[in-house]
Image (cartoon, rainbow, N blue to C red):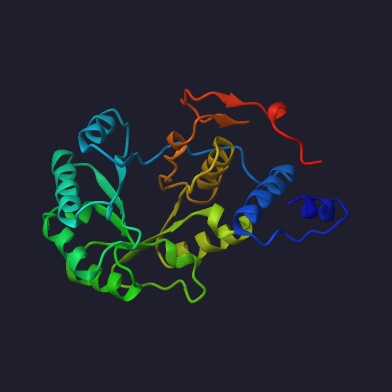
């Protein structure tokens, strides 16, 4: 990073090679140039990692569109299916985003689907990468009617944007993608095919999350972003997330690069 800064000060406009560094640098440059809008989308699809009853209570107080995310594939597929079905039954206006991180075999994926009422499956907004291979995930979508989304696939060399049966969305994690220009290209490619593009966090500081919220408001204004990860942190940095009670480290307390 220090080498890049020295090169930039000497007029070298090329970005670092590491995707996370390229993204952070490109955001900083966009802010300096006034390109990154100030408006931000601080809506968040709450992430359920434990007791579904907690999510039900949280969603009860959620204004407007009710969207939530569940990490599946951490427990038995049957349990995951029962939890998803319970939530969809309990909250008729709920749309669920599910993320399996390629955890399931085709059999496990089918076991999950078996426990989700076919009448509720249309309210699964999408299931990210249910199976270990794209072909198995495509087959799952065709056989169950549950829409899928690409996530990890976007960062693989052989991936191309295509309109496919059962594929409804792409989940774009800018910190893992690369420069802001590359993020914009992926969003545009998805929208051109009629796919939903969701801006999603990895594990960023509050500074990074607020930038992602601004990018979401700018590039995907009609879609609730997936940015509910600040609870993984012990403090905030430089910029605070609205409503967070975590302490914030001011810029003056950070070590200077130069």
On the rendered image, what quadrant is the C terminus found in? top right
Taking the spot 57% from the left edge, 58% from the top edge, the residue there is 184
Judge left or right: residue 215 versus residue 5. left
Give the residue at the far right of this rendering.
10
* Image vertical order of residue 251 relative to residue 177, above or below: above
Is residue 135 at least partly visible in the picture?
yes
Query: How many numbered discs?
Result: 0
Counting from the top left corner in percent of width and height, residue 43 is at 42, 37
Residue 38, by quadrant, is: top right
Judge left or right: residue 183 versus residue 170. right
Taking the spot 55% from the left edge, 35% from the top edge, the residue there is 206
Counting from the top left corner in percent of width and height, residue 197 is at 44, 56
Counting from the top left corner in percent of width and height, residue 10 is at 88, 54
Residue 163, by quadrant, is: bottom left
Q: Which of 117/253 is in front?
A: 253
* Image vertical order of residue 227 relative to residue 106, above or below: above
* Image vertical order of residue 234 relative to residue 150, above or below: above
Q: Which of 186/191 is in front?
A: 186
Q: Which of 34/137 is in front?
A: 137
Counting from the top left corner in percent of width and height, residue 79 is at 16, 50
Taking the spot 74% from the left edge, 43% from the top edge, the residue there is 32
Judge left or right: residue 128 versus residue 249. left
Taking the spot 28% from the left edge, 52% from the top edge, the residue there is 74
Q: Which of 97/191 is in front?
A: 97
Is residue 192 at least partly visible in the picture?
no
């Amino acid at each position: 990073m220090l080498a890049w800064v020295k090169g930039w000060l000497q007029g070298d406009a090329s970005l670092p090679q590491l995707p996370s560094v390229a993204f952070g640098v490109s955001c900083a440059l966009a802010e300096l140039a006034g390109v990154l809008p100030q408006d931000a989308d601080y809506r968040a699809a709450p992430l359920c990692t434990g007791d579904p009853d907690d999510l039900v209570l949280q969603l009860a107080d959620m204004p407007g569109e009710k969207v939530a995310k569940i990490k599946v594939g951490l427990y038995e597929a049957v349990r995951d299916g029962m939890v998803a079905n319970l939530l969809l039954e309990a909250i008729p206006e709920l749309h669920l985003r599910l993320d399996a991180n390629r955890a399931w075999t085709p059999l496990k994926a089918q076991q999950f689907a078996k426990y989700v009422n076919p009448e509720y499956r249309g309210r699964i907004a999408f299931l990210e990468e249910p199976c270990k291979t794209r072909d198995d995930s495509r087959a799952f979508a065709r056989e169950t009617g549950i829409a899928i989304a690409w996530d990890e696939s976007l960062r693989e060399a052989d991936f191309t944007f295509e309109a496919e049966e059962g594929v409804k969305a792409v989940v774009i994690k800018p910190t893992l993608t690369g420069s802001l220009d590359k993020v914009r290209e992926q969003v545009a490619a998805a929208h051109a095919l009629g796919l939903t593009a969701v801006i999603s966090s990895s594990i960023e500081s509050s500074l990074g999350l607020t930038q992602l919220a601004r990018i979401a408001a700018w590039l995907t204004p009609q879609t609730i972003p997936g940015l509910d990860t600040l609870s993984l942190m012990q403090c905030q940095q430089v910029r605070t997330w609205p409503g967070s009670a975590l302490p914030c480290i001011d810029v003056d307390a950070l070590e200077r690069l130069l």
